[in-house]
Amino acid sequence: MRVGLVGWGIASGVGSMNYDIVRLAPWVTHWLVPKHPNSENHEPYLQACGDSEVIKCELAGSEAEYKYFLDSIDVLLYVEHPCLRGSYNIVLEAKKRGVFVIGVPMWEWWPESKDWALATDMLWAVTDFTYRYLSSLSDVLFAHGFHHCWRNKVVQGQWGVNLDEFPFVPRKFAKRFVFINGNGGYKLRKASDVIFDAFSLPGAPPLTVYTQQTERLAENVPRSANLILGNFDERKDVYADGDVFIFCSYWEGLGLGLYEAQCSGALVVTTDHAPMNECGTDFVVPVEKFAQENLAGKKIVKAVPSASDLFEIVHSLNGVNISEISEMNGLIFRNRYDLRKILGMMYEQVVHYAT
């Protein structure tokens, strides 16, 4: 069974998920890579795809490439959304050819009533929260008369880490605290403002901040913070110089860094709200308040973590021997979140539903 992936090949969360799929799933034979409107392709991703054929294309107008791609596969797979713009609806075109379509949604962006979303045949839920959300949504859509092809075909899966590229490095003492802002996230969703408030309090440990830009970064940067601007050549490098990583987002579709950091031997601190608090860490920050945020034409919940409680957690961890926790996390998480195994389970479900 030939599975084709359509999606970004850039250095981003979804881009890295796409790369991991192609690297670890031998059943993915083709990768259609549309040109991102704001970022360049991360060529190391595209050059390390083994036997999978990489097909670059434009966001719109590359009909020859789109048709060649669809004619070469039996199953279409996308993460978050199928990317293409313009009049060519790749999901509907796939269905015309009898191609089975699988989606890996990020719950907060999922446009449930769009034609391509309704036409998707199966959904793979990356967290327990996502599974509950999509299962409930299916009932709501059905009750309102929306025919959706993925009805009763939401798979309670999970996601994981490409362990080949994230070696385990044991941590001894909690001395290096790191916040990965990256591209900043939509509407400062990574809560840099709250994190900076916490690390500005007297007695807070120094904070290292990794960010690709400063436009989507709160202005209240602590005086003691070490701000490092740029990107890393390899994803694993971002976890090399830290003991405790702060992931206190307002919301996440998955929160891949939570899993990568723990599989690399570090500790993580996150917001005590799903799906973030499903990652297995004991260090969760209570939500101070819930708000409503506008996102992609709909409203979602915004869980604002408490800056004072975050301070108490990092203050209590500062300088503590964490070697036992680090070693235990390495054993547990590298077994639980091995993406190669998880993708194998996904393929079993694909075969079950698509044949």
Image (cartoon, helix red, strand yellow):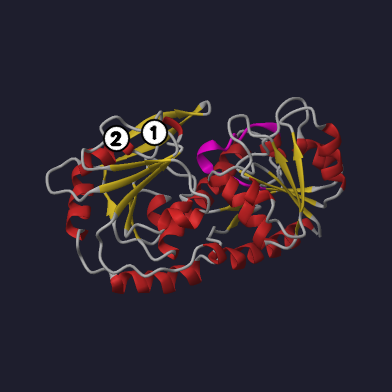
Does the magenta portion include 113? Answer: yes
User: Of callouts 2 and 1, which one flags the residue occurring earlier in the amino acid sequence?
Assistant: 1
- Number of the label disc, if any, that sits on residue 128: none
Whether residue 193 can be seen here:
yes
Q: Which quadrant does the C terminus fall into?
A: bottom right
Q: Amino acid at mark 2?
A: Asp
Report crowding for label 1: few under 14, some 14 to 19, many 20 or more residues within 10 A (C-alpha): some
Q: Which residues are magenta?
A: 103-115
Does the magenta portion include 232? Answer: no
In this view, the residue farthest toward the left is 202
Q: Residue at x 19, y 40 (%)?
A: 200
The image shows residue 24, relative to residue 185, as above or below, that is below
Q: Closest to the observer: 245 or 155?
A: 245
Q: Are marks 2 and 1 in contact (CB under 8 Å)?
A: yes
Residue 199: x, y in percent? 22, 44
Residue 17: x, y in percent? 59, 51
Q: Which residue is mark 2?
A: 193
Horizontal arrangement in the rendering, residue 199 relative to residue 88 (left or right):
left
Q: Residue at x 56, y 48 (%)?
A: 135
Residue 173: x, y in percent? 25, 66
The image shows residue 81, relative to residue 165, as above or below, that is above
Report crowding for label 2: few under 14, some 14 to 19, many 20 or more residues within 10 A (C-alpha): some
Q: Residue at x 57, y 45 (%)?
A: 14
Q: Which residue is mark 1?
A: 188
Q: Amino acid at mark 1?
A: Leu
Residue 333, quarter of the rendered image: bottom left
Q: Closest to the observer: 327 or 248?
A: 327
The image shows residue 90, relative to residue 19, as above or below, that is above
Whether residue 288 can be seen here:
no
Q: CA distance from mark 2 to mark 1?
A: 8 Å
Q: Residue at x 58, y 30 (%)?
A: 38
Horizontal arrangement in the rendering, residue 290 relative to residue 348 (left or right):
left
